Amino acid sequence: MGHQLYESCIKACQQCANICDHCSDSCLQEEDVHKMADCIRLTINCSVICRVAAAFMARSSAHSSQICKACADICEDCGKECAKFSASHCEECAQTCRECAEKCQKMAA
């Protein structure tokens, strides 16, 4: 498969990674940063796996589906955690993670 077949998912992963980076940084600026600890951890992990998934797909790796499955799972968890908070950066991250999870789930199938 050429990477063109993965283009939509690659873009979703790249966007999700960027939004997660923004969210984790913004969470560190919150008044009660301790209550954001799980959110920060998950957004960092999500950002990393999204970049890895995008790279695997760009290289048309035979392991893309396994990585995309892991990415979908982590994005789902991250989206659920971010949805617990009313900060706009968390709301945006939750939505972006859900969208990325859906695309990665399709790619993994």
Image (cartoon, grey):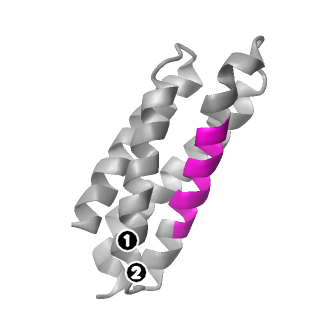
Q: Which residues are magenta?
A: 41-52
What main secondary structure does the magenta stretch of the protein show?
Answer: helix
Q: Which SS class for mark 2?
A: loop
Tell me residue 13's x, y (percent).
Answer: 46, 57
Tell me residue 17's x, y (percent).
Answer: 56, 51
Which disc is residue 66 wearing? 1
Q: Which SS class for mark 1?
A: helix
Question: Would you call the spot at circle 2 few (<14 residues within 10 Å), some (14-19), or many (20 or more)?
Answer: few
Q: Per the image, is 43 magenta?
A: yes
Q: Per the image, is 39 magenta?
A: no
Mark 1: which amino acid? Gln
**In this picture, residue 32 sits left or right of residue 10:** right
Q: Look at the numbered discs 1 and 2 and tell me whether their residues touch, using CB distance below 8 Å.
A: yes
Mark 2 lies on residue: 63
Mark 2: which amino acid? His
Q: How many numbered markers are drawn?
A: 2
Determine the residue positioned at 29% across, 88% down.
1
